Amino acid sequence: MEATTINTTGDAVTFLIEQHAQIRSLFDEVEHAPTADEREVKFYELRRLLAVHETAEEEIIHPLVRREVDDGAHIVDARLEEENKAKHQLADIEAVDIDSIEFDVKLAKLREAVLAHAEHEEREEFNRLRAELEPNELERLRSAVKFAEATAPTRPHPGVESATGNILAGPFASMLDRAKDAISKPRNK
């Protein structure tokens, strides 16, 4: 199953909140995987979902919040700072042996940062978007989010947290990431 597959008919906010729940679940699955091979598979799914999810938010949601929400620029700047930190943490954890104590420590710190970030998004961005936009606008926005995810890089790229940065670097990064994924994708055992 692809990490971004969510089969509901909700709007963009519902879709992203459901992905936050899936991210929480994947953190649990990585942490409690009984073997290194299974842990690697779950971490691969988690890394991929985090990368495409954040790219879609950076390309679609954050610019919209900047335009539509009072104090949107301040809110988005804080979320982008969190995303940059998490991308650095995620890139750093990839260099660590998945079966090590160091991995466990780094995973716990990443989890804490990502879940706090998700809570901030839900409270400060998503709820405010729901208040500002019509339901049909949010439903149409879901298609844009899903398209952004379908074309997004699948690995973290710290320093690329803006819509412009993603548009400029994203296609090339996505192509390289997907090639790396094809070569190094863990096999379910």
Image: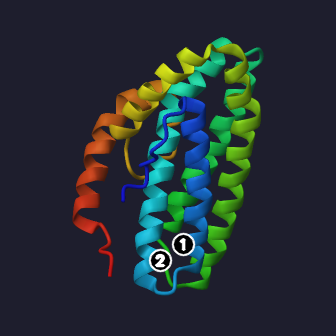
Describe the element under mark 2 as helix, strand or loop.
helix
Q: Do the residues labelled 2 and 1 touch (CB within 8 Å)?
A: yes
Give the residue pinned by disc 1. Answer: 30
Q: Position of residue 110 (x, y in %)?
A: 64, 61
Callout 1: few (<14), some (14-19), or many (20+) C-alpha neighbours within 10 Å? many
Q: Which mark is residue 111?
A: none
Q: Is residue 30 left or right of residue 131?
A: left
Q: Which residue is at the far front?
A: 9
Residue under the point 28% across and 39% down: 172
Label 2 or label 1, whichever comes before in sequence order: 1
The residue type indicated by label 2 comes to Arg
Question: Tag count in the figure?
Answer: 2
Please give the residue where the numbered disc 2 appears in the rendered image.
39
Tell me: residue 183, above or below residue 16.
below
The quadrant holding residue 74 is top right
| Image point (55%, 84%), residue name | 100
Measured from the top left, where is residue 113 in percent x and y? 69, 55
Q: Nearer the viewer, residue 185 or 9?
A: 9
The amino acid pointed to by label 1 is: Val
Determine the CA span between mark 2 and mark 1.
5 Å
Above or below: residue 175 compared with residue 168: below
Q: Is residue 57 above or below residue 102?
A: above
